[in-house]
Image (cartoon, rainbow, N blue to C red):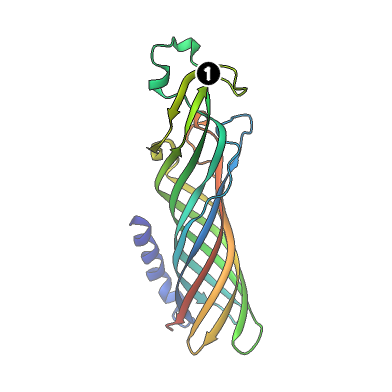
Amino acid sequence: MRNVIVLCLLLFCAHPLFAQTPIEIGVKGGLSIPNLTAGNKDNPLVSGYSSRVGPDFAVQVEFHLSKHFSIQPQLEYSAQGGKRNGYQAFPPPAALVAGIPAEQVPKYLYATFNSTAKFNYLMLPILAKYRLQLAKRWGFYVAAGPFVSRMLNAKQVTSGTSVIYADAGHTTPIAPETSLNQVTNIKDDLHDFNAGLSGHVGFAYMFGKSSVFVEGGGNYGFVKAQKSDVNGSNNTGAGVVNIGYSFRVH
């Protein structure tokens, strides 16, 4: 909510500067295809992630500075994270190592299961946009710029049943077939804020003061998601495909 208030204040303050500038308001929605990029490949908790699929949608305001150039702030809900399936490492749960002397507890345990990291952010990109007219009603555009974001929620969803091992080589079992079905809130282990770059390219069909468009692009966060390297060291990022509608209000 604080991000929404800040955006409204920015637009209100900017209105006198753009009083004679054509303005479009739009909405869009589609798919986010995020992944987690490993920053420290020596840590088995961060490697092996692949993309998952989640929602992405936004409201945007476009200030046309000239025939070709515009500035476009947008408020965007973005699904981030990634998934790992198969044999993988995880931190030792207290219930599994209860009774084992602390000096003998392995740093990681290993098992075969499915794990999905689901992070959801509210993002505020400020994009510079360049537009070309391809035909009477068709246009092409490219947009890019920085963003700041706030994490809304984060959880780790695991599923499967597996023997649990103390080593990556499957040689030292410490627990028999064990259910690993669990949903864990991990928001406190992650940074609340991030910042990075966002961009996309798209095609628009214009009719009257309105247009419909389809675009594809992505975003990448510069801040490591985890607060501590003990939990990993990953950068968030996603490919995004959206369709949308905009109309000129000024």
Residue drawn at (56%, 36%) of the image: 86
Could you say which is closer to the camera, residue 194 or residue 90? 90
The residue sitting at the right extreme is 134
Quadrant placement of the N terminus: bottom left
Q: How many marks?
A: 1
Q: Residues within 10 Å of mark 1 (few under 14, many from 20)?
A: some
x then y, percent, for residue 180: 43, 32
Q: Quadrant of residue 40?
A: top right
Residue 102 horizontal side relative to residue 129, left or right: left
x then y, percent, for residue 84: 55, 40
x then y, percent, for residue 153: 39, 47
Residue drawn at (45%, 81%) of the image: 247
Q: Compared to 50, does 6 lie above or below?
A: below
Residue drawn at (55%, 32%) of the image: 45
x then y, percent, for residue 72: 51, 69
Residue at the spot of label 1: 173
Quadrant placement of the C terminus: bottom left
Q: Compared to 154, does 99 lie above or below?
A: above
Could you say which is closer to the camera, residue 238 or residue 21? 238
The residue sitting at the front extreme is 177
For label 1, the SS is: strand
Question: Tag 1: residue type?
Answer: Pro
Residue 192 horizontal side relative to residue 201, left or right: left
Q: Compared to 132, does 2 lie above or below?
A: above
